[in-house]
Image (cartoon, helix red, strand yellow):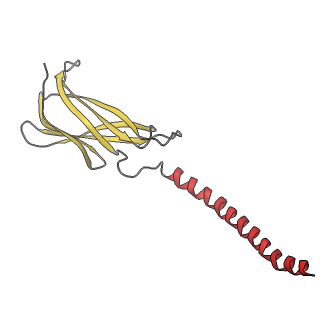
Amino acid sequence: MTISKSVCFYAPLIILGLFSCSTKKADIASEAPSIQQKEIHNNNVQGCPVLKSGKWHAWIKDSTNQSKGYQLNVKGEVTLPNPGFDIVWSAGPTDRMNPPGLRLNLQPKPTSMMTIQVLTNVSVSHRLDTPLKGYRSVSIYCAGEILGSIKNVGKSG
């Protein structure tokens, strides 16, 4: 008779314990898809995805296209959150100083392909035909944030 009393006492506890374990597994399983959805939605990068930048330098040389006169060359390195970005450059406005300062916009665009999430150092460069043989400064921007500025850019050798 004592066996049936202990079975009656422990059976509900065992069932309750098993039930609580299965409920936790269901909660974890139901959370997993929402985590994946957040990761997928993070491909729509807002703002500038560049985490770090440096090693910026610029120089001017004679252009291979004779009608323009000179060619501005800019090189640097940026760290991106993954290798799934295409780099697009655009020239912004120059100021009214003599020689002028130039603003370049670096725009990393996320690709639609799947990539591993690993910090990636990327060498970036841009060439721009220009009639000027010097700039007071060349500033590189990404989504309104300044990444670097190079002073006194002139013709090399």
Where residue 134 appears, as percent x and y from the top left, is 11, 30
Q: Going 39% across and 41% down the picture, which residue do you hit?
A: 80
Q: Quadrant of residue 101?
A: top left
Position in image of residue 6 (x %, y %)? 85, 78
Q: Is residue 107 left or right of residue 58?
A: right
Q: Quadrant of residue 149?
A: top left
Measured as percent of width and height from the top left, residue 75 is found at 26, 31
Asked if 30 appears above or below 64 in the picture, the reply is below
Q: Nearer the viewer, residue 102 or 156?
A: 156
Percent x, y of residue 106: 31, 40
Give me the residue at 58% from left, 58% from top.
34
Nearer to us in this view, 40 or 17: 17
Residue 4 drawn above or below residue 151: below
Quadrant for residue 152, please give it: top left
- Residue extending farthest front: 2
Q: How many marks?
A: 0
Question: Is the N terminus in the top left, top right, bottom left or bottom right quadrant?
Answer: bottom right
The quadrant of the image that shows the C terminus is top left
Q: Residue furthest right?
A: 1
At horizontal 9% and vertical 43% (from top left) the residue drawn is: 96
